[in-house]
Image (cartoon, rainbow, N blue to C red):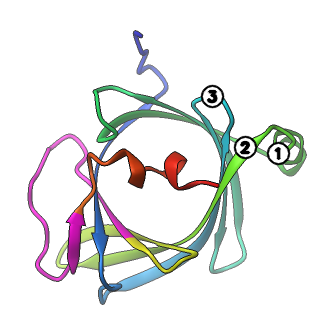
């Protein structure tokens, strides 16, 4: 399938199962993802520490074989649009995202309801193999489909 990147942002993320939350958390937000059944669509609600709520509809398309490189397009939704689209059948994923700023790096650590911690490092346009020593890595799950959001959703 040919993918237009005109309105998309390309994410190049590496994901790691980690044993503990590292020092350096600067913010935390609650995330509810609704993966719309039979599509590449995700509804996301983000609740920030200050009470701000952001809702958006996202479309994700893989640019390579595995989950490491994805073209993402988002549309922000108002409450009425959110409520309407929430009627679509979907699998849910709830998590707490901790933003860690340490040693010049930004790492998103998702804490799932069962306590599992998954760290995401966005490499942007520069692929990297660097993993900070302070990230207590149990396993590199970057290429493991079972650790993608859609697979973790119930």
125 in magenta: yes
Work out whether residue 9 or residue 129 is closer to the camera in this orientation and state it.
Answer: 129
Compared across the picture, whether 111 is left or right of 20 comes to right
Query: Which residue carries the number 2 mark?
Result: 90
- Within-10-Å neighbours for mark 3: few <14, some 14–19, many 20+: few
Looking at this rendering, what residue extends furthest in the top direction?
Answer: 2
Say which quarter of the image contains residue 100: bottom left
Do the residues under discs 1 and 2 have CB atoms within 8 angstroms?
yes
- Residue 86 is marked as 1
Callout 3 secondary element: loop
Judging by the rendered image, the residue that carries numbered circle 3 is 39
Q: Quadrant of the N terminus?
A: top left
What distance separates the C-alpha of mark 1 from that of mark 3?
A: 14 Å
**Image location (x, y in percent) of residue 108:** 38, 67
State which region is magenta.
118-139
Which residue corresponds to the image point at 11% horizontal and 51% vertical from the top-left? 128
Q: Find residue 65 and report its image quarter.
A: top left
């Amino acid at each position: 399938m040919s993918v237009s990147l005109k309105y998309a942002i390309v994410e190049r993320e590496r994901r790691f199962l980690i044993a503990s939350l590292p020092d350096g958390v600067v913010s935390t937000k609650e995330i509810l993802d609704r993966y719309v059944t039979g599509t590449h669509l995700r509804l996301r609600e983000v609740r920030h520490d200050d009470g701000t709520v952001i809702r958006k509809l996202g479309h994700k398309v893989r640019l390579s074989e595995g989950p490491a490189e994805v073209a993402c397009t988002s549309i922000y939704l108002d409450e009425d649009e959110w409520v309407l689209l929430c009627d679509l059948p979907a699998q849910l994923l709830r998590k707490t995202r901790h933003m860690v700023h340490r040693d010049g790096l930004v790492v998103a650590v998702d804490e799932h309801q069962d306590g599992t911690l998954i760290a995401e490092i966005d490499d942007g346009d520069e692929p990297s193999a660097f993993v900070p020593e302070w990230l207590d890595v149990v396993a590199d799950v970057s290429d493991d489909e079972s650790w993608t959001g859609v697979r973790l959703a119930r």
